[in-house]
């Protein structure tokens, strides 16, 4: 029996970056099994080399629109943009990981394998143009992160965070799959191109209850991954309990991949029925802004405070989706890139402090940080100011572009809430800066030196936070090009 595969559209170049990352994970797995313990310190280097190769493989996708494998994945500018973003975040995570893992006696090869697995799932999610590949991408990244959250096997809080993430993640996956089933039942297609054709054909899609329910359930699953309220309950507990270096990675990468999928689903697939999904997404954005900013005010645990901050930023990113236009989505894509730089940097500072043996949880333990570790305090200040949206940092322009998109679309209520909540957020971000500037309560003890790779990562993140704030147009142009979705 001869099987005809000519209509499938096999194009391995489209998924070459993902294949390189998966191949690197397999290589690291075999090296971890075969190399003696004394030589396993080469594993981070092999991981970085593989990620750099995937980065190079992503560049040819820029400016393309290559659908492959039966319209289940696409190689386009959006996929290339998020591939580069996710790979850079993964490389920076690997660079700051060894010192932290050795300090906690967690320096095992499985860590890098799981990190690569999560990265490949996120990249697949960013390139997915089918309900099936969206599900596969989410599950691949989720399973890897479930294990990474519980990687500190002797820490009860780490195991608790992994269990909470697993149980709530499985619950959210049920909503996701049910929504996909309803959308397939309403449209007869699992590809986003086929669904978009059904919706755009004027076949009464705006009144199709089955389709609207499916979109609602699908939104729940995606909002869960994006840490958007009211589907955020896992976020502070998981961020607090997971090893800090894992939190650093997942706080940025998971949100980025989730919003790439949200953009494809709502901007490219359902633009003609935007009036139907506008109100639920607006409520999610407003809830995220309120809950994230208001609860962060009362948090004394810095990891939990940054978790609620991430919930609020998910609301800001969603604001760019509300107009249902490429211009609005480009503002969200720029915001994602800006958030990746500044939030990764903030958590990387926590990772560096934790690797030095200091406690990072309680904000009172940061008192006098400028006197103890001036470099870490300085870069942390830059990241806090950027997260608050204070110029000339990139966080200011990220909020400005999103607000501008709302003004152009004449969407006023969410805009007013966002402006007010931005002012509220100044309190808890500047509180960290004030605490670091306060006079220490005890004599300054000699602290361990900062690792070279960690220092370079923090310096690069701080420099990027300022440079992208002074010269934001280049990245905004890239974001605008990436956000020009079409099927």
Image (spheres, rainbow, N blue to C red):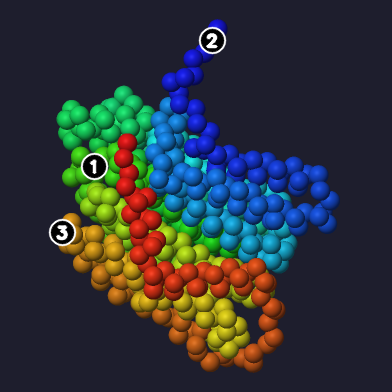
Alpha-carbon span between mark 2 and mark 3: 57 Å
Residue 326: x %, y % from top left: 28, 50
Circles 2, 1 touching at the beta carbon (< 8 Å) = no
- On the question of residue 215 being in view, the answer is no
Mark 2, secondary structure of its residue: loop
Mark 1, secondary structure of its residue: helix
Q: Earlier in the sequence, mark 2 or mark 3?
A: 2
Foreground residue among 331 and 67:
67
Q: Earlier in the sequence, mark 2 or mark 1?
A: 2
Residue 342: x %, y % from top left: 46, 68
Mark 3, secondary structure of its residue: loop
Relative height, residue 76 to residue 210 (above, below): below
Relative height, residue 327 to residue 185 (above, below): below
Residue 240: x %, y % from top left: 53, 63
Please give the name of the residue rendered at 59% of the width and 57% of the height, measured from the top-left corner: 91
Point out the frontmost of discs 2 and 3: 2
- On the question of residue 448 being in view, the answer is yes
Please give the name of the residue rendered at 60% of the width and 48% of the height, measured from the top-left corner: 53
Alpha-carbon span between mark 3 and mark 1: 17 Å
Please give the name of the residue rendered at 48% of the width and 69% of the height, measured from the top-left corner: 464
For residue 271, the mark is: 1
Q: Which residue is mark 2?
A: 2
**Residue furthest out toward the top:** 1
Alpha-carbon span between mark 2 and mark 1: 41 Å
Circles 3, 1 touching at the beta carbon (< 8 Å) = no
Please rate how many residues cluster around mark 2, counting C-alpha atoms within 10 Å: few if below 14, some from 14 to 19, many from 20.
few
Q: Dividing the image into 4 quarters, which one contains the N terminus? A: top right
Please rate how many residues cluster around mark 1, counting C-alpha atoms within 10 Å: few if below 14, some from 14 to 19, many from 20.
some
Residue 120, quarter of the rendered image: top right
For residue 410, the mark is: 3
Residue 146: x %, y % from top left: 56, 48
């Amino acid at each position: 029996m001869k099987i005809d595969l000519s209509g499938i559209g096999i194009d391995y170049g489209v998924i070459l970056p993902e294949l390189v990352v998966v191949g690197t994970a397999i290589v690291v797995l075999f090296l971890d099994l075969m190399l003696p313990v004394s030589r396993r310190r080469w594993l981070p280097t092999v991981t970085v080399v593989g990620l750099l190769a995937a980065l190079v493989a992503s560049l040819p996708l820029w400016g393309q629109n290559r659908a492959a494998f039966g319209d289940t994945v696409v190689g386009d500018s959006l996929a290339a943009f998020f591939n580069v973003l996710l790979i850079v975040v993964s490389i920076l995570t690997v660079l700051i990981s060894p010192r932290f893992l050795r300090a906690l006696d967690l320096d095992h090869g499985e860590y890098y394998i799981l990190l690569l697995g999560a990265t490949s799932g996120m990249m697949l999610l960013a390139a997915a143009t089918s309900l099936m590949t969206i599900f596969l991408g989410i599950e691949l990244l989720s399973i890897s992160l479930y294990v990474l959250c519980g990687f500190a096997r002797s820490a009860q809080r780490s195991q608790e965070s992994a269990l909470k993430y697993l149980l709530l993640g499985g619950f959210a996956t049920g909503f996701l799959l049910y929504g996909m089933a309803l959308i397939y039942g309403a449209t007869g297609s699992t590809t986003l191109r086929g669904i978009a054709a059904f919706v755009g054909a004027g076949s009464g899609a705006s009144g199709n209850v089955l389709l609207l329910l499916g979109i609602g359930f699908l939104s729940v699953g995606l909002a869960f991954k994006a840490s958007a309220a009211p589907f955020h309950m896992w976020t502070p507990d998981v961020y607090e309990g997971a090893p800090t270096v894992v939190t650093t990675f997942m706080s940025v990468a998971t949100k980025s991949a989730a919003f790439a999928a949200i953009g494809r689903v709502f901007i490219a697939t359902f633009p003609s029925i935007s009036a139907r999904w506008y109100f639920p997404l607006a409520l999610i954005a407003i809830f995220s802004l309120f809950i994230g900013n208001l609860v962060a005010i009362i948090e004394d645990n810095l990891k939990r405070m940054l978790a609620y901050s991430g919930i609020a930023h998910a609301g800001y990113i969603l604001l760019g989706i509300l107009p249902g236009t490429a211009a609005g989505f480009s503002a969200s894509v720029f915001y994602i890139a800006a958030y990746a730089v500044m939030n990764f940097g903030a958590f990387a500072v926590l990772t560096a402090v934790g690797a030095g043996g200091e406690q990072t949880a309680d904000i009172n333990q940061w008192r006098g940080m400028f006197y103890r570790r001036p470099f870490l305090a300085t870069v942390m200040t830059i990241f806090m100011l950027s997260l608050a949206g204070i110029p000339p940092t990139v966080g200011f322009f990220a909020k400005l572009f999103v607000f501008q998109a709302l003004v152009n679309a004449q969407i006023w209520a969410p805009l007013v809430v966002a402006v007010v909540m931005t002012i509220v957020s100044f309190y808890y971000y500047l509180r960290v800066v004030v605490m670091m500037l306060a006079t220490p309560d005890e004599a300054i003890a000699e602290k361990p030196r900062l690792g070279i790779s960690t220092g370079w990562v923090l310096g690069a993140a701080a420099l990027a936070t300022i440079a992208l704030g002074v010269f934001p147009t280049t990245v905004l142009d890239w974001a605008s090009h990436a956000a020009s979705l079409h099927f």
